[in-house]
């Protein structure tokens, strides 16, 4: 785990061997660059916000970071048949393993199940009734009423489709997650999905598309970067510890902004932590992080040092991070902390333990971006309904940007979202790693660890609000107690906050 400085001339020191990578936050759409520049021209924060926008454009143009090329074949998409293993997902039931944990606890209130399950069995189910049918499937399974469950699932399969309405697309993945839960194959399917991920360059392409069609994701990273730039405006040496480095793209525009500081660019050290069992901890994705950082270093003449650590977050130690005196330490948790087990899974409570470890390092700033969903300790049926509501809103937001029959959209939903849905619904115990919590709960955890909230930049938030409006009036941004909530219509999807 040696460090590899990336000098302004673009030459990495010695022979670089980079640790892990996947993707985080691509740049803004080209159509919005002018809007971003116009609303930042007279701002005191120009050095960050305007540079943030232009950085994305320049990196795309020089090949360091590009949107996905158009993928042909949208006219040949099959919604529920033939050669696509995800278009008839129940084929995955052949994967078998033992599921750890109980199978369902509790029921929803009657308002969620207006129609009786007998009615759903005996009558045609139009799309608007699919939510009730899916929840009835979950209730039957939680009650171990397998005969009724099988009948309801059979009916649900007739109306779900990966090219249908948002609720139909989500339903296609959730039905198979329910069947996997019934057959205790959730863990194996989840692991198979991870092992079956596309090559790093293809996954990066899908993630790029996801961030373009789900702007609340990339703008939450923009909010985090704005807080970092503001907190470190006078620092000469900055050390960023990223607990999910992915493809490292969150840092491209921040580095350009730091390089443009009036007093000169700081020295930036980036320590990237990522899942050691990821394919990209063992493949070319690691080198891709180095290449991208190298290119930014050379283009904007900012010294950057990168070191990757392939380790699970709870296993990180102070010694691994090689903290140095004289550096402003920034710790970043991007859609990662919810994957660290808490007290409901492990009595040692690794989630809060990790926060205490970070606090002991006396960081200048800690940034947190998380899904605004409550799936950690809720009973199974309630968790199912929450997941259905969350992803239906996400899928609905995509409809305004991409056709339901486009191959790109299907690949994004399949490779970027379906795995999480399967894990939330089909797995229990330690195998259920997707354990989301609401902003209020994260605030409590950070406060108990000794942190106090650091307000996000009001100006950067205003820029994000304007840019978000360029996508759809249905997107919303709410500033609450120094944090930011981003969502679609009446559903919050992502929160961003900063702490110190």
Image: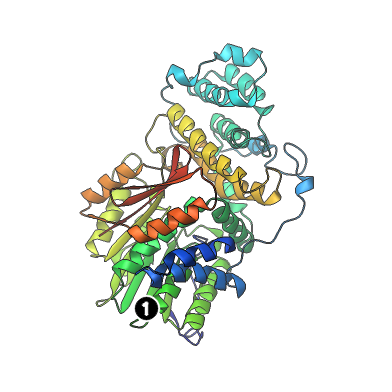
Number of numbered discs visible in the structure rendering: 1
What percent of the width, then of the height, locates residue 460? 38, 60
Q: Is residue 429 visible?
A: yes
Estimate the x, y position of residue 275 in percent, counting from the top left. Answer: 46, 58
Secondary structure beneath disc 1? Answer: loop
Q: Is residue 3 visible?
A: no
* Structural crowding at the residue carrying mark 1, measured as other residues with C-alpha within 10 Å and reported as few (<14), some (14–19) or many (≥20): some
Residue closer to the observer: 324 or 207: 207
Against 8, residue 423 (above or below) is above
In the picture, which quadrant includes the N terminus? bottom left
Query: In this figure, which residue is indicated by the disc labeled 1?
Result: 261
Q: Is residue 2 above or below residue 247?
A: below
Q: Is residue 456 above or below residue 261?
A: above
Instruction: Give the residue drawn at x 65%, y 39%.
Output: 92
Residue 370: % across, % down: 40, 49
Residue in the image at 60% along x and 58% along y: 203
Q: Residue 270 vs residue 417: left or right? A: left
């Amino acid at each position: 785990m040696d460090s590899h400085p990336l000098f302004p001339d673009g030459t990495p020191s010695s022979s670089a061997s980079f640790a892990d990578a996947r993707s985080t936050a691509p740049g803004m759409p080209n159509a919005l660059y002018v809007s971003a520049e116009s609303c930042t021209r007279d701002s005191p924060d120009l050095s960050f916000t305007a540079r943030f926008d232009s950085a994305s454009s320049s990196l795309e143009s020089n090949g360091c970071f590009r949107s996905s090329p158009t993928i042909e074949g949208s006219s040949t998409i099959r919604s529920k048949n033939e050669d696509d293993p995800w278009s008839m997902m129940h084929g995955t039931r052949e994967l078998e393993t033992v599921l750890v944990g109980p199978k369902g606890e509790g029921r929803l209130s009657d308002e969620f199940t207006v129609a009786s399950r007998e009615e759903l069995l005996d009558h045609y189910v139009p799309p608007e009734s699919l939510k009730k049918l899916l929840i009835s499937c979950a209730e039957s399974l939680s009650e171990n009423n397998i005969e009724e469950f099988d009948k309801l699932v059979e009916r649900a399969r007739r109306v779900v489709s990966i090219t249908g309405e948002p609720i139909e697309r989500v339903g296609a993945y959730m039905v198979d997650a329910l069947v996997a839960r019934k057959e205790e194959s959730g863990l194996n399917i989840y692991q198979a999905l991870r092992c079956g991920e596309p090559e790093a360059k293809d996954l990066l392409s899908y993630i790029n598309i996801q961030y373009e069609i789900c702007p609340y994701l990339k703008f939450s990273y923009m909010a985090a970067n704005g807080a970092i730039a503001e907190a470190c405006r006078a620092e000469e040496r900055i050390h960023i510890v990223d607990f999910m480095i992915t493809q490292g793209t969150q840092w491209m525009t921040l580095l350009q902004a730091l390089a443009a500081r009036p007093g000169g660019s700081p020295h930036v050290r980036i320590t990237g932590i990522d899942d050691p069992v990821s394919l990209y901890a063992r493949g070319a994705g690691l080198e891709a992080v180095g290449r991208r950082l190298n290119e930014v270093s050379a283009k904007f003449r900012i010294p950057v040092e990168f070191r990757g650590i392939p380790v699970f977050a709870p296993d990180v130690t102070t010694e691994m991070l090689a903290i140095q005196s004289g550096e402003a330490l920034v710790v970043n948790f991007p859609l990662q902390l919810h994957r660290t087990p808490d007290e409901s899974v492990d009595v040692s409570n690794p989630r809060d333990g990790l926060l205490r470890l970070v606090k002991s390092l006396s960081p200048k700033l800690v940034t947190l971006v998380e899904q605004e969903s409550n799936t950690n300790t809720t009973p199974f049926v309630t968790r199912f309904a929450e997941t259905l509501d969350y992803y239906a809103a996400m899928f609905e937001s995509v409809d305004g940007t991409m056709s339901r029959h486009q191959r790109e959209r299907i690949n994004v939903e399949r490779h970027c979202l379906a795995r999480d849905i399967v894990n939330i619904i089909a797995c229990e115990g330690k195998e259920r790693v997707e354990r989301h919590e609401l902003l209020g709960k994260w605030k409590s955890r950070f406060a108990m660890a000794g942190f106090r909230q650091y307000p996000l930049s009001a100006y950067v938030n205003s820029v994000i609000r304007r840019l978000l409006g360029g996508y759809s009036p249905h997107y919303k941004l709410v500033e609450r107690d120094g944090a930011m909530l981003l969502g679609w219509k009446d559903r919050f999807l992502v929160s961003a906050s900063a702490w110190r």
